Image (tube, helix red, strand yellow):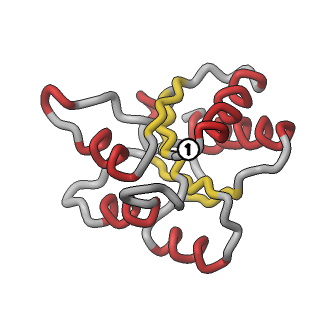
Amino acid sequence: MGASLNPTNARIVLVADDDENDVLLLRRAFQKAGLSHTIVHVKDGQEVINYLGGVGANAKPSPGLLLLDLKMPRLDGFDVLEWLRNRPERLPVSVVVFSSSGLQQDKEKAETLGAHDYLVKPDNFDSWILVAKRLHEQWLDG
């Protein structure tokens, strides 16, 4: 779809997912693909908002990519997309939904709320490596 909107911090990937195993697979896939991006993990939508909305002493480096699961506790991925969409200023981050859901209505809703891409989580490790390479090429190589 396009290069990262924030090339200066393209090395940082913010992963919002409550499944530790999926985050571990993603980290290993990036390593196996030879990609040295920093993966920052948060466990739910509220932690995404806290990370991205931090200011002053709470400010954290802006990621080049937000990988966003849909089904999370507290606030889900749709809540995060809604929050991003309603901010007075746009954050310079590409958002890719990375979900187990392949439902067309989830894809359409994510797109309507401003997601840049939608990927369904793979079912084997070789496919995880391909996903890591695709994310790098399309969103992190800017």
Q: From the viewer's perspective, tell me whether residue 42 is left or right of residue 129.
A: left
Mark 1 residue crowding within 10 angstroms, few (<14) / some (14–19) / many (20+): some
Left or right, 50 with respect to 12, comes to: left
Residue linked to disc 1: 3
State the image quarter where residue 28 is shown.
top right
Could you say where residue 126 lies in the image, as x and y percent from the top left?
A: 86, 37
Q: Is residue 21 above or below residue 88?
A: above
Going 45% across and 43% down the picture, which residue do you hit?
43
Dot 1: element: loop
Figure quadrant of the N terminus:
bottom right
Between 120 and 74, the one lying in front of the other is 74
Q: Position of residue 121 (x, y in %)?
A: 71, 52
Could you tell me which residue is drawn at 43 percent across and 60 percent down?
76
Q: Could you say where residue 54 lies in the image, as x and y percent from the top left?
A: 22, 38
Across and down, in percent, residue 111 comes to: 52, 70
Residue 93 placement: quadrant: top left
The residue that appears at 65% across and 36% down in the rendered structure is 136
View extreme (bottom): residue: 105
Residue shown at the point (70%, 58%) measured from the top left: 120
Horizontal arrangement in the rendering, residue 122 relative to residue 75 (left or right): right
Q: Quadrant of residue 103?
A: bottom right
Residue sticking out furthest to the left: 56
Quadrant including the C terminus: top right
Q: Amino acid at mark 1?
A: Ala
